[in-house]
């Protein structure tokens, strides 16, 4: 089954769909796993540098809202770049995970309102 981006826009954080590409999806043992990789676009705030793509950071796994009785886990790989002049590693500073949790910010806020935080 091919997941539609329009459908994903209704159920996933906007940040993911704007700045990350869905690369794989699978369902196993009642759990939906969605894997995302940060797009190759260089950070706008670093346009003054000459950057080249330099791989990914270690994947993080974040739990999101359950869908149709299935747990949902977002596997997110953040990109890093290398500044050709200084050899400094450059990355975006994403606020992807609610502090003190392994859940998306939206999901943590939802649970907090329910008193299950």
Image (cartoon, rainbow, N blue to C red):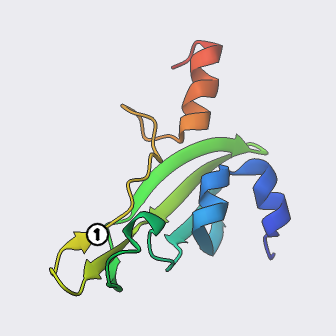
Q: Is residue 61 above or below residue 87?
A: above
Image point (58%, 12%), residue name: 115
In the foreground, 62 or 84: 84
In the foreground, 75 or 28: 75
Task: Measuring from the top left, give residue 75's x and y in whole percent.
Answer: 49, 61
Task: Measuring from the top left, give residue 28's x and y in whole percent.
Answer: 62, 63
Q: Is residue 34 above or below residue 61?
A: below
- The part of the image, by quadrant, that contains residue 111 is top right
Image point (67%, 52%), residue name: 14
Mark 1 surroundings: few (<14), some (14-19) or many (≥20) residues within 10 A: some
Single out the residue that lies furthest toward the left: 86
Task: Measuring from the top left, give residue 57's x and y in whole percent.
Answer: 32, 69
Q: Is residue 37 visible?
A: yes
Q: Secondary structure at mark 1?
A: strand
Q: Is residue 115 above or below residue 10?
A: above
Number of marks in the rendered image: 1
Quarter containing the N terminus? bottom right
In the displayed structure, does residue 104 sit left or right of residue 80? Answer: right
- The part of the image, by quadrant, that contains residue 9 is bottom right
Image point (65%, 15%), residue name: 114
In the displayed structure, does residue 78 sit left or right of residue 67? Answer: left
In the displayed structure, does residue 24 sit left or right of residue 56? Answer: right
Single out the residue that lies furthest toward the top: 115
Image point (81%, 51%), residue name: 10
Q: Is residue 30 visible?
A: no
Residue annotated with mark 1:
90
Task: Measuring from the top left, give residue 27's x and y in whole percent.
Answer: 66, 64
């Amino acid at each position: 089954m091919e997941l539609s981006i329009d459908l994903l826009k209704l159920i996933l954080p906007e940040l993911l769909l704007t700045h990350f590409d869905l690369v794989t999806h699978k369902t196993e043992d009642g759990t939906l796993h969605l894997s995302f990789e940060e797009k190759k676009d260089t950070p706008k705030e670093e346009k003054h540098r000459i950057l080249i793509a330099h791989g990914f950071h270690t994947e993080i796994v974040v739990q999101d809202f359950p869908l149709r009785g299935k747990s949902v886990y977002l596997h997110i790989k953040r990109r890093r770049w290398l500044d050709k002049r200084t050899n400094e590693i450059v990355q975006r500073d994403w606020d992807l995970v609610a502090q003190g949790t392994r859940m998306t910010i939206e999901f943590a806020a939802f649970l907090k309102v329910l008193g299950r935080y």
